[in-house]
Image (cartoon, rainbow, N blue to C red):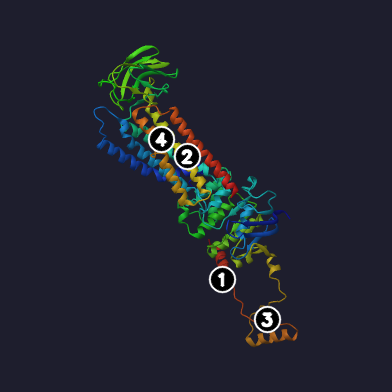
């Protein structure tokens, strides 16, 4: 007699998800890689791997969709009135008939599928071998820079060393004949350098690299020009000097992708306390769509960050993922209470 | 007599907004002893399944008290001691029979080796040991029923709640299931089975409960319920004239001859004999 490969709910669900989701995910990954190779995005002379983010997002989303739907269809207590659910309710531990364990199985399968994509396919699509922390310090009040107000100061966390500054401000109408704004960057009172190009329009991004050093503060000085500049959040980014492996960054993307899947599964389970399988699957698919390629949450930005070589573990990503987790946990709690009432 | 199940004024009412309330079970007092096979009879909608679901802890009673082996139904301590076999199809249809039983064993917290040994025993006993990696969803109704019974028996329960345990089974399968249920009762388990197969109930059950519209209509042993003051005399080797003479003698002695018929065995009894012959030959 061959002993069964999986006995518990987590591993059984995970195995079922892998059985159904592996092929579509591989097919999507292969198709996306081929498209990216044969028809790379036209980005001019400089490499812009961030432009390839749809080709990484699509197979990752395929894995998320396939795993969550396969898991929900596999486990009988996700929806009301499913065949054999009395068996499961009676035998599975906990008030939700094994749904939390099944969700864990779904997430495990999804992690196994998305990890190679986030680490391997991302490199194949041009992600740099190392990633760096990109920190956008909050701008000061009234963040305007012009001939009349010549400098803005940005506070930095003291724990890191930095090696570059990216500036991408909003440009206003010139106050005299058009002369692009020339900026100098100071760190802790010392001149780090002048930006290599004058800024004449919104969207223009200029970078300044400097030897790695700790910084507590960055000051941007308006040297000359006639174009006033505004620095909303994100217009100035400092780049950390520490090299971080893209493999770890890929792992972070795979973890970030778990958050919308968890929230979607938990909300689907909540819907399943009152609705049948078709409604539950519709709710699930809609929520997965919104949470991934729909742009709500951290996933979309994390894909682009991975391909650009930006370290994903920023406070914004962490907060968005924790919000998803909290929504999912609340939904499971509500589902448990609803089942107890029925 | 060890009491396995006890209900006092047990009632279940299903209420939904805009619809009249359905009294699935009306106040019901039951004491069921261990070591017996009790049949629950009644037409569709009479409350048989509701009674079993209440005892299994899947349905909360609207009113009244219930204890199973001295505990409230559905309490964690009864997970292994009380087994429930619902009437419908099995869940997790993509699993094989062994995988399904392995999951049941894991949920019952059986050690893997113990669970596998028990599973193998019941699969062999219920003639499912050659199903290999075949998925449950491809099983016939009868195979699913037999596997469901194997799952119910895996934890060696003291109370077996079975909803239509022989529905969809061939006569050989029914005979096998009934033999197993007899063994379980002999080993001290209470077997409570809802069924529409009256012949099987008559053959196997020590006691019968008859429900109608959620209310208890009759209860007792088969002999008590079918008791009669008539007697049957079964003879062989007499011609019609001699039979008429016998009948006349009975009348002269004050008796009433209700009918003279040629007795015929039931098909089910024939199948049982054939099954015994087959088992003896293998």
Instruction: Report helix, strand or loop for mark 3.
Output: loop
Instruction: Report helix, strand or loop for mark 4.
Output: helix
Which is closer to the viewer, label 3 or label 1? 3
Which is closer to the viewer, label 4 or label 3? 4
Marks 4 and 3, how far apart at CA: 85 Å
Q: Which mark is residue B238?
A: none
Which is closer to the viewer, label 4 or label 2? 4
Q: Mark 4 — on which chain does it sit?
A: A
Marks 2 and 3, how far apart at CA: 74 Å
Instruction: Give percent across and percent down for residue A319.
Output: 47, 31
Q: Residue at x 66, y 79 (%)?
A: B235
Q: Which residue is mark 3?
A: B258
Q: Mark 1 — on which chain does it sit?
A: B
Q: Residue at x 48, y 43 (%)?
A: A265
Say above or below: A138 vs A337.
above
Q: Are marks 3 and 1 on the same chain?
A: yes
Which is closer to the viewer, label 2 or label 3? 2
Q: Which residue is mark 1?
A: B267
Neighbour class for label 2 at 10 Å: few (<14), some, many (≥20)? many
Instruction: Give percent across and percent down for residue B74.
Output: 63, 49
Instruction: Give percent across and percent down for residue B137.
Output: 46, 55
Residue B147 is left or right of residue A24, and the answer is right
Q: Which residue is mark 4?
A: A299
Considering depth in this image, is A256 or B140 the residue closer to the camera? A256
For residue B208, say whether it is visible: no
Q: Which mark is residue A262?
A: 2
């Amino acid at each position: 007699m061959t002993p069964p490969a999986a006995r518990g709910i987590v591993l059984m669900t995970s195995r079922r998800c892998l059985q159904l989701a592996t092929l579509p995910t591989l097919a999507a990954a292969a198709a996306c890689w081929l498209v990216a190779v044969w028809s790379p995005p036209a980005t001019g002379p400089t490499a812009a791997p961030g432009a390839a983010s749809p080709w990484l997002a699509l197979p990752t989303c395929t894995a998320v969709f396939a795993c969550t739907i396969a898991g929900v269809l596999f486990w009988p207590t996700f929806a009301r009135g499913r065949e054999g659910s009395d068996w499961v309710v009676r035998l599975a531990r906990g008030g939700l008939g094994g749904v939390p364990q099944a969700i864990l199985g779904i997430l495990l399968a999804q992690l196994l599928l998305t990890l190679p994509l986030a680490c391997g396919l991302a490199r194949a699509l041009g992600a740099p071998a190392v990633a760096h922390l990109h920190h956008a310090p909050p701008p000061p009040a009234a963040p305007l820079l012009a001939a009349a107000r010549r400098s803005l100061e940005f506070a930095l966390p003291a724990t890191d060393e930095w090696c570059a500054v990216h500036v991408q401000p909003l440009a206003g109408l010139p106050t005299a004949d058009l002369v692009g704004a020339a900026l100098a960057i100071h760190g802790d009172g010392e001149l780090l350098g002048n930006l290599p190009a004058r800024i004449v329009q919104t969207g223009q991004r200029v970078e300044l690299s400097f030897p790695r050093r700790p910084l507590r503060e960055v000051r941007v000085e308006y040297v000359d020009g006639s174009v006033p500049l505004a620095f909303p959040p994100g217009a100035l980014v400092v780049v950390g000097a520490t090299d971080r492996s893209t493999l770890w960054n890929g792992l972070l993307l795979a973890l970030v992708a778990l958050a919308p899947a968890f929230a979607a599964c938990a909300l689907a389970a909540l819907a399943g306390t009152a609705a049948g399988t078709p409604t539950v699957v519709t709710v699930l698919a809609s929520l997965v769509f919104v949470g991934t390629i729909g742009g709500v949450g951290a996933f979309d930005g994390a894909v682009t960050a991975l391909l650009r070589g930006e370290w994903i573990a920023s406070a914004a990503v962490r907060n968005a993922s924790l919000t998803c987790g909290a929504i999912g946990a609340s939904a499971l709690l509500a589902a448990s209470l609803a089942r107890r009432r029925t | 007599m060890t009491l396995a199940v006890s209900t006092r004024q047990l009632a279940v009412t299903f209420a939904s907004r805009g619809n009249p309330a359905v009294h699935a079970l009306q106040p019901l007092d039951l004491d069921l002893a261990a070591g017996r096979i009790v049949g629950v009879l009644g037409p569709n909608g009479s409350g048989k399944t509701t009674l079993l679901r209440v005892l299994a802890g899947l349905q909360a009673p609207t009113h009244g008290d219930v204890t199973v082996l001295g505990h409230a139904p559905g309490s964690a301590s009864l997970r292994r001691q009380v087994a429930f076999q619902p009437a419908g199809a099995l869940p997790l249809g993509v699993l094989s029979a062994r995988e399904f039983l392995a999951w049941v064993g894991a949920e019952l917290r059986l050690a893997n080796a113990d669970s596998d040994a028990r599973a193998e025993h019941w699969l062999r006993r219920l003639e499912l040991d050659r199903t290999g990696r075949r998925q449950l969803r491809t099983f016939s109704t009868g195979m699913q029923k037999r596997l469901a019974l194997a799952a119910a028996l895996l934890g060696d329960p003291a109370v077996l709640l079975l909803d239509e345990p022989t529905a969809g089974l061939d006569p050989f399968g029914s005979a096998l299931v009934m033999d197993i249920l007899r063994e379980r009762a002999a080993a001290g388990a209470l077997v409570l089975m809802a069924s529409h197969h009256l012949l099987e109930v008559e053959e196997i059950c020590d006691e019968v409960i008859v429900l109608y519209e959620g209310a208890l209509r009759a209860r007792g042993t088969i002999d008590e319920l079918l008791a009669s003051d008539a007697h049957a005399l079964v003879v062989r080797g007499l011609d019609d004239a001699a039979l008429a003479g016998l009948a006349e003698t009975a009348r002269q002695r004050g008796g009433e001859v209700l009918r003279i018929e040629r007795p015929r065995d039931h098909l089910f009894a024939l199948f049982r004999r054939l099954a015994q012959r087959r088992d003896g030959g293998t």
